[in-house]
Image (cartoon, rainbow, N blue to C red):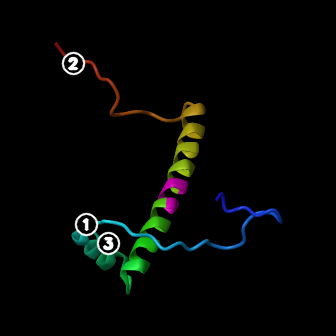
Amino acid sequence: MSGRTKRGPKRGPTLRRKHLILDQAKIDRAKRILRAATETETIDRALETVSDLARFQVEVDAGLDRVLGRRRFVDFFGVTQRSQ
């Protein structure tokens, strides 16, 4: 099912029960880092964080493209010539 109905796009999140085999240590670490109360909240916050990070990366890439396009960016860590 695609999340769409004959009446139009879906409204709000579609919650589904999932059975997953996950590393408990990773869940515990994420739960501490995200200060989540439950494991469900931990996984939900982690997924939101990944989505936010992907959007941020798109913004950073677009900004760098603009800077590089203006030729004002100096790459101090690019290829350098060795002195002989």
Q: Residues within 10 Å of mark 3 (few under 14, many from 20)?
A: some
Residue in the foreground of this view, choosing between 71 and 34 = 34
Q: Secondary structure at mark 1?
A: loop
Residue 70 position within the rendered picture, expressed as x and y whole percent measured from the top left: 60, 33
Residue at x 42%, y 68% (from the top left corner): 46
Q: What's the CA distance linking mark 3 and mark 2?
A: 45 Å
Q: Which mark is residue 30?
A: 3
Determine the secondary structure under disc 3. helix
Amino acid type at circle 2 is Arg
Task: Report if the CB atoms under discs 3 and 2 are less than 8 Å apart.
Answer: no
Residue at image position (61%, 71%) is 14
User: Label 3 is placed on what type of residue?
Assistant: Ala
Which class describes the residues within 10 Å of circle 1: few (<14), some (14-19), or many (20+)? few
Q: Earlier in the sequence, mark 2 or mark 1?
A: 1
Depth-wise, is mark 3 or mark 1 nearer the camera?
1
Distance from Cα at disc 3 to Cα at disc 1: 11 Å
Quarter location, residue 34: bottom left
Q: Which residue is mark 1?
A: 23
Q: Quadrant of residue 66?
A: top right
Could you tell me what secondary structure mostly forms the magenta stretch? helix
Please, which residue is most extreme toward the top here? 84
Disc 2 target residue: 82
| Kind of residue at disc 1 | Asp
Q: Position of residue 79 (x, y in %)?
A: 32, 24
